[in-house]
Amino acid sequence: MVLGRAFEDMCAQMYYRGKMFGFVHLYNGQEAVSTGFIKLLKKEDSAVSTYRDHVHALSKGVPAREVMSELFGKTTGCCRGQGGSMHMFSKEHNLLGGFAFIGEGIPVATGAAFSSKYRREVLGEADCDHVTLAFFGDGTCNNGQFYECLNLAALWKLPIIFVVENNLWAIGMSHMRATSDPQIWKKGPAFGMPGVHVDGMDVLKVREVAKEAIERARRGEGPTLVECETYRFRGHSLADPDELRDPAEKAHYAARDPITALKKYMIENNLAKEAELKTIEKKIDEVVEDAVEFADESPQPPRSQLLDNVFADPKGFGIGPDGRYRCEDPKFTEGTAHV
Amino acid sequence: MAATFQGLGAATALSLSGSFDSKRLHLLSRRSLSGRKTNFLVVRSDGRIVSSSMPARRSQQFIANAVATKADQAAASTASKSGHELLLFEALREGLEEEMDRDPTVCVMGEDVGHYGGSYKVTKDLANKYGDLRVLDTPIAENSFTGMGIGAAMTGLRPVVEGMNMGFLLLAFNQISNNCGMLHYTSGGQFKIPIVIRGPGGVGRQLGAEHSQRLESYFQSIPGIQMVACSTPYNAKGLMKAAIRSENPVILFEHVLLYNLKERIPDEEYVLNLEEAEMVRPGEHVTILTYSRMRYHVMQAAKTLVNKGYDPEVIDIRSLKPFDLHTIGNSVKKTHRVLIVEECMRTGGIGASLTAAITENFHDYLDAPIVCLSSQDVPTPYAGTLENWTVVQPAQIVTAVEQLCQ
């Protein structure tokens, strides 16, 4: 969680210094959800996120260096600079994105869960119990794709957990103003799956709920809908002036900061001492500094990267007038061919 | 005279490959409707000719359907007995089944593909053979099950997603554009999406505006996808197999009216090239580029044109994205006149893109401006007469060629 917080704060700094551009959505305040859930996953389990995906990537195991380079648009980023803030992908760590449109990732997560079930039942890999986590916000819960996927997942008992990060605001639209029945967890039982509500500012409570949901999915009992009540301390993105939210509400949630809460809990229960926690924080700061340095020093993508990876099989660029596949043209690999 | 060419099988057809004598060719020209012939050799773009069948004694008429209503004259069946005869939808199923046998990660998902066997019977009995999970009946949620197919493709499966009608895939546009096409690039090459999205489209017989859409014009701009259109049982099976084996996301466009075309296809396994165009009828005077159902209107017009003394070269472009500029270019360099006949609308269709591509690459070789015959920019009306006027008819093709060759 500390890594997430420190990383996001550094992102804000870097953005205002002109190192990264575009839309950057920070996760401050919601760290408990990411940590609570993702830390229970194995490496083979998949996670799907939205544009607010930096911390999901970090929790899933993507190195901070790679995430920071990706944000700077350098070729050493996890997506070679081609994805950016909103599109973090990692095949190694099974992070399936990073999607800009809300709700777009939920069917993809359903597909990953379907793969898992397919492996077990059709391909005969009896011990395949990979689960998929789909993270999305309260705004998404009014979108068709969400409901369609709840139906698909419950129908086929797919090993997926739908995690709603309800931070009460979709840019400037309050959840109460947008939703006829604001209690999202209630929508689970309507489709035949358990719906759970949990305090998303308390990482231990989240972890407890997550544990149960993930085990359910691993046993093949089907999906769960978990609504985490949480809050984002910053605006929707770094371009959001954040004027609509009531300062009293912000103060209320700031008092429930998940990191401070966990620190307090650990110290009170003698699980750690102040000094140890301070050391951890210092180490994290070093990691983040190192990530920034690495990203700064990394090269920008060369021209030859422009046409790379549009197709998995570059023959898809077709046969040119000279009868050869376009991808065989030497200019193609320099990125200067016109296709 | 036609009788002497009846017995053409693969072997004899080979011996004709060198000649482009137009007199012999007009007898060899492909029948426009209900192909019933051996055609091993259609594949290559180097101009090897197809073997023939009986030329029809059909007078010029308004083509209201391109469906073979019955197997053709017994006289024509003296052609070689190798291979087996089947209908286009059966060819698609055969291709799909062979690929599913070959690779256990190939699965099918769509509405009514399982127990119902597919609304056009392309997946008939496959659910009985492979099970309900591998031939998955989905609820009516195109966006989500297409997205599910994409997620499955990212995690190692090779799904074939069926749109019951191509028009329904408009609901899945978000997933097809953003995820199917773009994810390989956006993830820096980490995830490949070997998905096949297929379904029937095009103007049918009085199906109404919404069931008569030509989605190829809407999808063509999406970077990262390939589009192919099949038109005969032979190329349907070959393209289906190629699409499934391809690592790229491929959209396979079938046509509602072509599912009952009958043809004899080889017993041996064959896979066609996704990026190549098909030389249907070599010629000298004009290049006619077409695909899917319009191929049959063109061949019908070709019959008339040949009787009038013209020698059209007909190419079924097959690969809608990317275009096979090699085959097309060679043809343009030979004939110097181009006519494009398509079923898309005039505005922004495949023909529009093809016109631009040819002008850009082969401008010096053209003796006349490219003529593009497309459907009217009109929602397809229900009334049969109106519907016939929205699509290109053979008479218009004949007139266009005559004007072009003046």
Image: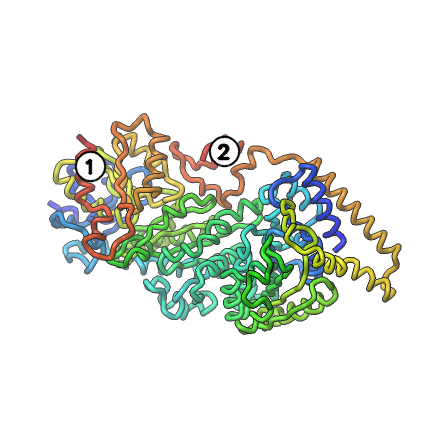
Residue B14 seen in the current view: no
Q: Which residue is mark 1?
A: B401
| Along the line of sight, the residue nearer the viewer: A127 or A260 | A260
On the rendered structure, is A162 left or right of B49? Answer: right
Q: Amino acid at mark 1?
A: Val
On the rendered structure, is B60 left or right of B128? Answer: left
Q: Quadrant of residue A37?
A: bottom right
Q: Residue at x 82, y 60 (%)?
A: A263
Chain that bears disc 2:
A
**Quadrant location, the N terminus of chain B:** top left
Q: Residue at x 14, y 49 (%)?
A: B61
Q: Amino acid at mark 2?
A: Phe
Packing grade of label 2 (10 A; few <14, some 14-19, many >=20) is: some
Chain that bears disc 1:
B
In this rendering, the answer to whether B284 lies above or below A50 is above
Q: Residue at x 54, y 37 (%)?
A: A306
Q: Which residue is mark 2?
A: A332
| Along the line of sight, the residue nearer the viewer: B203 or B110 | B203
Q: Quadrant of residue A84?
A: top right
Residue B256: give x, y in percent of width and height.
Answer: 29, 57
